[in-house]
Amino acid sequence: MTSWLAFAGAAVLEIVGCFAFWAWLRLGQSVLWLLPGMAALAGFAALLTIAESPLAGRAYAAYGGIYITAALLWDWLVEGHRPDGWDVTGAVICLIGMAVILFAPRAMPA
């Protein structure tokens, strides 16, 4: 459960942090948007460290499914673009892949 919560929080922080850069560079907002954006990205990185995985790469790979789903929700709730059936299907596939990567039983190393 810790991983799911860490991934969800990390996804929100990553999207917020990246959106701050998007707002500055693409939407013409003030460079001051970068300050909370960089703080959000630092929080995102810190949250990924509490995932229930002994390997950083595996945690990052599993996180991808949550991030993709959160990005589609951001697109819908913040930017007003409702995901279509293909978006939802892709997100479900990614979440299944994430669960396999993170929760599959693994043999203990010798």
Image (cartoon, grey):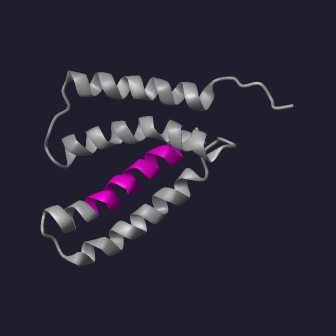
Q: Residue at x 27, y 58 (%)?
A: 19
Give the percent coordinates (x, y) of residue 11: 41, 48
Q: Is residue 25 above or below residue 82?
A: below
The residue shown at (61%, 47%) is 56
Answer with left or right where residue 72 lies relative to residue 43: left
Task: Locate residue 20: give its quadrant.
Answer: bottom left
Q: Is residue 49 left or right of residue 18?
A: right
Q: Is residue 86 above or below residue 46?
A: above
Where residue 30 appears, as percent x and y from the top left, is: 18, 76
Q: Residue at 64%, 42% (x, y): give it.
A: 52
Q: Position of residue 47 (x, y in %)?
A: 53, 55
The overriding secondary structure of the stretch rendered in magenta is helix
Q: Quadrant of residue 1?
A: top right
Q: Is residue 31 left or right of residue 103?
A: left
Image location of residue 18, percent across then percent down: 31, 58
Asked if the stretch drawn in magenta spans residue 7, the answer is yes
Relative to 23, residue 69 above or below: above
Is residue 50 part of the magenta span, yes or no?
no
**Numbered circles on residues, count:** 0
Q: Which residues are magenta?
A: 5-20
Residue at 53% across / 27% down in the picture? 99
- Name the quarter where the C terminus is drawn: top right
Question: In this rendering, is residue 23 above or below 73?
Answer: below
